[in-house]
Image (tube, rainbow, N blue to C red):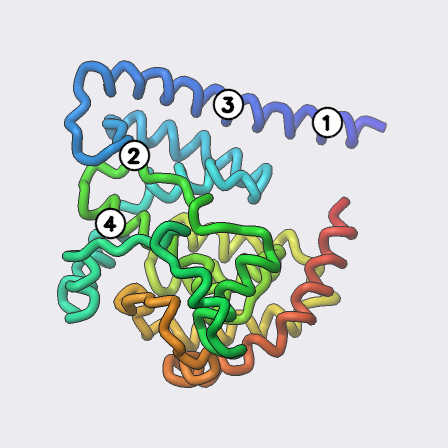
Amino acid sequence: MLQPVLGRLNRLHYILISKVCVHQVHSSSSVCADSRYDGLYPGHIHTTPFQKAMLAIGSGVAVLQDPYRHDMVAVLGETTGRLALMNIRDKMRNDPEGYTILTERPRIRLSTLDLKEMASLPDGSFGREYLRFLEENLVTPDSRADVKFVDDEELAYVMQRYREVHDLLHTLLGMPTNMLGEVAVKWFEAAQTGLPMCALGAVLGPLRLNARYNNQCFDQSLNCSTELMDHETFNVYSRCSHPWVLGLCRTAIGPAASSASSSRDDGRKASKTSEKSST
C-alpha cells in the first residue's frame, strides 16, 4: 500500500526540483539577456557558471524522468558539453572537409534539402533512405532546437550540427526511433563526440529496456556503435541529394554498420515489448 504512494511522491519531488531549477535559471537568464546580452548569435542567452550548473541539474532530473523531453535533453547537452565541443571543433579544423564545414556552415533544414531530387534517387541511396526515414517516422530536421546556452559562436554551430546530423546517423546505422534505436545511436554519438549528455543516455538508456528479450539485439547495436567510433562522421559534408549508395557508405566506415540495418525489425519488436513491460 505505502510503496506506490511513496513512489508517486518521489516522482513528484523530482519533477518539482527540475521545474524550480529550470524556471529559476530561465528567469535569471532573461534578466541577463536584457542587461548583458553580447550578441554572439541569434537566440543566445548569456549564463553564468552557477546558472549553467542549475540548468544542468534541472534538465538532468527532467530527462531522467522522461527521456523524450527533447527540450531538456538540448539544455543538458549545451550546459555540460563545452569541453567536448571544443574537442570536436579542433578535430574538424584539422580535417580538410571538416574545415570546409566550419567555414561554410551548411545547415540541414527543409529549406536546404532538395526533397524532389532525393525522392527521385534509387532505393538504397543515402538521400533516398534518409528521406524515407523522415517520412516513416514523421520527423523533420526543422524540429531540432536552436542552440541558446553555448557561450561561443563557433561551438554553438558545432552543437547545432550535432543535432542536425542525428537523423542521418539513424539512417546510416539503420536504427529506428524507438528506445532501443535511440540508445544505440547514443552509444555511437558518445564515442564520436564525447558529449556527457550522450554518455548519460548511453549508460542509463538500457535500464528502460527489457533485457531478457532484447539483450542480443542491443549487443549487436552496441558492437556496431563501438566499432565505428574512430570514423569522424562530423567531417563528412552531408549532401543528401548525392546518389551515394547507403550500403557502400556503411561498408566504408566499418563492417558492423552493414549488419546494423538487419537488426532494425528486431529492435522495433524489442522496444515495443520493453515499453509494454514498463507500463
Give the percent coordinates (x, y) of residue 214. Answer: 69, 67
Give the percent coordinates (x, y) of residue 128. Answer: 49, 70
Mark 1, residue position:
6
Give the percent coordinates (x, y) of residue 108. Answer: 35, 55
Q: Residues within 10 Å of mark 1 (few under 14, many from 20)?
A: few
Q: Residue at x 24, y 58 (%)?
A: 88
Secondary structure beneath label 2? loop
Mark with earlier residue (1, 3): 1
Determine the residue located farthest toward the right in the rendered image: 1
Mark with earlier residue (4, 2): 4
- The answer to whether residue 41 is above or below residue 99 is above
**Quarter-of-image position of residue 255:** bottom left
Mark with earlier residue (4, 3): 3
Can you see residue 163?
A: no
**Quarter-of-image position of residue 6:** top right
Give the percent coordinates (x, y) of residue 243. Answer: 40, 77
Q: Residue at x 22, y 47 (%)?
A: 155
**Circles 2 and 1: CB distance less than 8 Å?**
no
Mark with earlier residue (2, 1): 1
218 lies left or right of 2: left
Q: Residue at x 62, y 56 (%)?
A: 178
Mark 1 or 3: in front is 3
Cα–Cα gap, marks 2 and 1: 35 Å
Secondary structure beneath label 3? helix
Mark 3, residue position:
19
Cα–Cα gap, marks 3 and 2: 18 Å
Q: Residue at x 32, y 39 (%)?
A: 147
Cα–Cα gap, marks 4 and 3: 27 Å
Mark 4, residue position:
83
